[in-house]
Image (cartoon, grey):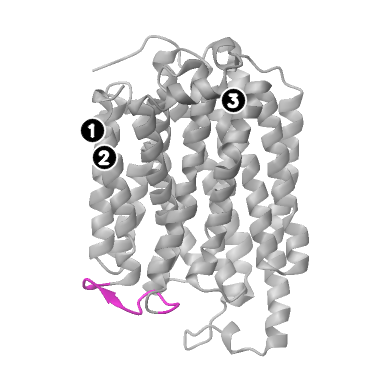
Amino acid sequence: MKSETDPLVPQHIILPFILVTSLFALWGFANDITNPMVSAFKKVLELNNFQASLVQLAFYGGYFTMALPAAIFVNRYSYKKGVLIGLALYAVGALLFYPAAAYEEFIYFLSALYILTFGLAFLETTANPYILAMGSKKTATRRLNLAQAFNPLGALGGLIIAQNYILAALRSDDINEAGEPVYNTLTESAKSVIRTSDLQVIRDPYVILGGVVILFFIVIAITKMPQNKDQEARVNIKNSITRLFKSSKFVGGVIAQIFYVGAQIMCWTYLYQYAEAIGIDNATAVNYGIAALIVFSVGRWIGTALLRYVSSGKLLLYFAIGAMVCTLLTIAITGYPGLYALVAISFFMSIMFPTIYGIALEDRDEDSKFGAAFLVMAIVGGALMPTLQGMILDIGGSGYTDVSILGVSEVNFSFILPFICFVIIAIYGARVKYLK
């Protein structure tokens, strides 16, 4: 059993802590308003599953591209300036949805998402180690779990907006009395009218989001933020990276993070396809996405409390095993019980990202900013693995139950990928106490 007497957050930096913590909700909103867009773009622009999955490739590819440049920037300047650059890029990417909708080209939407996530890469590379530095090292992982607990609240807001103001308003998702899509039966001129309308529906929430991000930029720009001399001191990039990659705990954390983010995005993106395969339309399926986020949020609060008494490695192992069990049920069971199991996975995913992050950066001190960059680059797992799952879904055609693989439909079988991810995370959790 373990407990700490050090305060989680020193009183004199409560306001900066709240402001930085609010950023976790802000990028959570962007993540989860985007997940349903895979299905939305597929219908509006008549894409196959692989093409639609490029939404996630662009979104999470931006993290991979910009994480290390963000760390180099923060190393030269400061955490605060890194946050401000992140917010600026976030706003620009969101506002670019306006011209993307005007041109009605998928590549422009992908480009806007790519730039938007340049900003998110700056924010995550900066905010995560910043939170770790805002107090005692003994409470650092708990503090990061607390800050990360607000991420699903923003994500929940993103899903609610997606459900009520995007998916519910898309005319390309209409079905006739026979349950067949109307959009596919229309003439090209009729489709063009609906396409223009639907792309404007997708555009508007992102443009409004860009305005909100600009407000955050202004507030943080005029607020005095604390500095951590150890973590904000300039360090030699080559020496720092060399030290990091000599640590088995850090390297294992980066690998575990790649597979965690891949698993999370697959479970949250293809929940909609899983639901559609059992006859649930996209707008209704968002309710299950919301349920997953609520379960995720509850799991994170419970996990944060448990970290007072259970070591981070052991808790990570237990939660990974729980996720493996739920994923096997998702694969093996069809219908609503399988969907419920898919939702339940979110409870066990809840503590994984911040716990892996905290373990990997434990005692990294001045190397944290570059360590953070590689852990954010690990988010590329969210770009690559959903694409692989999309390819599995395309095996028998553009539907989700075209063929049977090992006795289950391809949409069920495709969740073997998240299962493998959770096995790797469980191994990392089990090995943590032996790693240096």
Looking at this view, is 377 or 184 the one in front?
377
On screen, residue 23 above or below 397? above
Position of residue 124 in the picture relative to residue 401 (left or right): right
Instruction: Give the magenta range.
Output: 397-408
Q: Which mark is residue 18?
A: 3
Label 1 neighbourhood size at 10 Å, few (<14), some (14-19), many (20+)?
Answer: some
At x 70% / y 26%, what residue is drawn?
81
Could one spot residue 78 in this view of the protein?
Answer: no
Q: Where the N terminus falls, by quadrant?
A: top left
Looking at this view, is 373 or 430 the one in front?
373
Secondary structure at badge 2 equals helix
Label 2 neighbourhood size at 10 Å, few (<14), some (14-19), many (20+)?
Answer: many
The spot of residue 362 in percent (x, y) is 40, 21
Position of residue 246 in the picture relative to residue 323 (left or right): right
Tag 2 near tag 1, CB within 8 Å: yes
The spot of residue 420 in percent (x, y) is 29, 51
State how far apart marks 2 and 1 are (Cα).
6 Å
Q: Which residue is mark 2?
A: 426
Q: Which mark is residue 430?
A: 1
State how far apart marks 2 and 3 are (Cα).
32 Å
Tag 1 near tag 3, CB within 8 Å: no
Q: What amino acid does circle 2 point to?
A: Ala
Q: Which mark is residue 110?
A: none
Label 3 neighbourhood size at 10 Å, few (<14), some (14-19), many (20+)?
Answer: few
Which badge, 2 or 3, is on the more N-terminal residue? 3
Secondary structure at badge 1 equals helix
On screen, residue 169 above or below 290? below
- Point out the frontmost of discs 2 and 3: 2
The spot of residue 105 in percent (x, y) is 70, 68
Q: What amino acid does circle 1 point to?
A: Ala
